[in-house]
Amino acid sequence: MNRTIGFVAALLSVLLSANFSHAQSGKPGVERLYILNCGEGVASDVSRWSPGVDEGKSMDFVDNCYLIKHAQGWMLWDTGIPDAVAAMPNGLAPADPKSIFWHRPKTLAAQLDQLGVKPSDIKAMAVSHTHPDHIGNVEMFPATMLYVQKAEYEWPGANGEPRFKPGHPVTRLEGDHDIFGDGSVIVLSTPGHTPGHQSLLVKLPHTGAVVLSGDAVHFKSNWDNRRVPSINFSKEQTLASMQKISETMTKEKAQFWINHDKPQRDSLKLSPEFYD
Ligand SMILES: [Zn+2]
């Protein structure tokens, strides 16, 4: 009996969400995805991310934000380093000299403006985790619902500071989450780099499925060799999350777009071009 009720409830919710997205624009699901330049940097010692490998070698990093146009509204994945860095002639020096020296060739605000998107148009926002190169512009969108793992939200910052402005609208997640209720944009819980790290599965109508890494891995050779940065919160969780991503990619026939991987990003189209 319970199973029958459960089945009917599940069927109803599928039908309702499908009707809802049709009603909005006549076309369900994700329409477009834009890759925005949210920073460019140089790491002076890349072995910080690949212990024992390439010690003392520098590596170029990029930092992306991803803007998704869904039939139900706009969504932003990650917010990059703060727009204020664009006005710093020498860029933003890292606290740890082995880490990344960031520049911001373009602001996030200017790239949204170029697309005719106002910050208030963005209905949903999710960040992979709370390191400064991912949350730098969260408060450009003070009314946008933020989707973040509870474990990340409650992870105490420096001096016990909250990770986000306490008044910001938030949905605290405990695991995977289907943002629009139609299976087209799914937050994947991928802890390890930080306690509540997450990645994003996006299903595009022509491009197909894409997994946006966050910092589950930082560049392709680390992915190929399953290397875990020494700075990560948990090595075991990081490896389990890489396995989960790999299984998701197989199941969904998904591409894997690694946020900080410059050679890969240079091979992809940047906004105002887009993927559909
Ligand atoms: Zn990062």
Image (tube, rainbow, N blue to C red):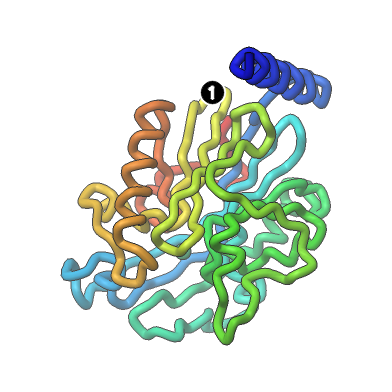
On the image, the x and y values in percent for residue 36 come to 58, 52
Give the amino acid at mark 1.
His
On the image, the x and y values in percent for residue 19 come to 77, 18
Residue found 49% across the figure and 74% down from its top = 102
For numbered disc 1, what is the local secondary structure?
Answer: loop
Q: Which residue is mark 1?
A: 206
Residue found 52% across the figure and 83% down from its top = 90
Q: Is residue 249 above or below residue 2?
A: below
Picture quarter with the N terminus: top right
Of residue 12 and residue 271, the one placed in the foreground of this image is: 12
Q: Is residue 24 left or right of residue 147?
A: right
Q: Is residue 107 left or right of residue 132?
A: right
On the image, the x and y values in percent for residue 20 come to 79, 24
Mark yes or no: residue 123 visible: yes
Occupied quadrant, residue 10: top right
Residue found 27% across the figure and 55% down from its top = 222
On the image, the x and y values in percent for residue 151 come to 54, 61
Residue that lies at the very extreme toward the front in this rendered image = 1
Mark yes or no: residue 266 visible: no
Of residue 118 and residue 138, the one placed in the foreground of this image is: 138
Occupied quadrant, residue 57: bottom left
Q: Is residue 67 above or below residue 196?
A: above
Picture quarter with the C terminus: top right
Q: Is residue 30 above or below residue 122?
A: above
The 10 Å Cα crowd at callout 1, few under 14, some 14 to 19, many 20 or more, is few
Of residue 241 and residue 263, the one placed in the foreground of this image is: 241
